[in-house]
């Protein structure tokens, strides 16, 4: 089950905006309301430019927690996933989708290399296996071009527009 943040216009008053945005409080509420849920995982997504040396690509930066990879059946081809410790200590580490790894690094090994996402440097700790493109509702889902990082790192290192919630999605497995 994917709980998706609705599009907000920004014309609502600030208090109403806050009430309608997904937050970490919603995760606690979902765990209480759905006690049979195996996993309740936060997701934030933002679009930025990512660069390695002379290569530059537009990417979707996905901030989440380690459980997301198993929940979405995303498996490692090289390296490893980030940990809860990486998340709680705001580490600037990332896992690359298969296509973005190939686009940025061509034939070079990306592990332990530094990439720049917007103005923030991250160390590559993993590369995912290629994931077939799927459809969720009316949207095409291609996670191969995403870069994944600890959600706390993403939320603290990158600015957000006031009309954007802290989370774009909450993924629930029952």
Image (cartoon, rainbow, N blue to C red):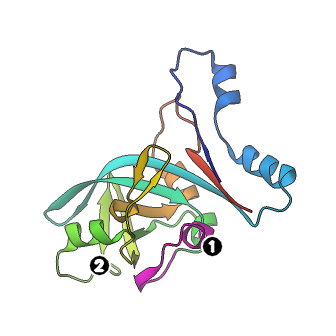
Report crowding for label 1: few under 14, some 14 to 19, many 20 or more residues within 10 A (C-alpha).
few
Who is closer to the viewer here, 58 or 137?
Answer: 137
Name the image quarter holding residue 72. bottom right
The quadrant in which residue 6 appears is top right
The reply to whether residue 156 is visible in this rendering is no
Q: Residues within 10 Å of mark 2 (few under 14, many from 20)?
A: many
Quadrant in the picture for the N terminus: bottom right
Residue 91, percent from left and from top: 51, 67
Q: Is residue 116 above or below residue 101?
A: above
- The residue pinned by badge 1 equals 85
Give the residue pinned by disc 2.
Answer: 110
Disc 2 from disc 1: Cα separation: 22 Å
Compared across the picture, whether 91 is left or right of 31 comes to left
The image shows residue 26 at horizontal and vertical percentages of 74, 44
Left or right: residue 140 versus residue 63 is left
For the point 47% across and 82% down, the residue is: 80
The reply to whether the magenta stretch includes residue 142 is: no
User: Which of the two discs, 2 and 1, labels the residue nearer the N terminus?
Assistant: 1
Dot 2: element: loop
Residue 99, disc: none
* Residue at 28% from the left image edge and 65% from the top image edge: 100
Q: Quadrant of the C terminus?
A: bottom right
Q: Identify the residue at image location x=42%, y=85%.
A: 79
Q: Position of residue 142 (x, y in %)?
A: 38, 58
Q: Secondary structure at mark 1?
A: helix
Q: Which residues, given as a range, are shown in magenta?
A: 66-81
Q: Is residue 165 left or right of residue 99?
A: right
Marks 2 and 1 in Cβ contact (< 8 Å)? no
Q: Is residue 154 visible?
A: yes
């Amino acid at each position: 089950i994917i709980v998706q943040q609705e599009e907000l216009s920004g014309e609502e008053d600030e208090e109403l905006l806050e009430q309608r945005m997904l937050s970490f409080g919603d995760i606690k509420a979902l765990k209480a309301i759905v006690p049979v849920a195996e996993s309740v995982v936060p997701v934030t997504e933002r679009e930025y430019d990512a660069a390695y040396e002379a290569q530059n690509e537009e990417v979707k930066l996905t901030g989440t927690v380690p459980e997301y990879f198993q929940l979405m059946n995303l498996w490692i081809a090289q390296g490893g996933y980030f940990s809860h410790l990486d998340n709680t200590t705001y580490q600037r580490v990332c896992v690359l989708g298969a296509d973005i790894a190939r686009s940025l690094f061509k034939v070079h090994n990306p592990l332990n290399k530094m990439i720049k996402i917007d103005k923030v440097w991250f160390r590559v700790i993993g590369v995912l296996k290629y994931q077939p493109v799927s459809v969720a509702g009316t949207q095409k889902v291609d996670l191969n071009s995403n870069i994944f990082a600890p959600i706390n790192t993403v939320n603290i290192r990158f600015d957000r527009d006031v009309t954007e919630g802290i989370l774009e999605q909450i993924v629930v497995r029952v």
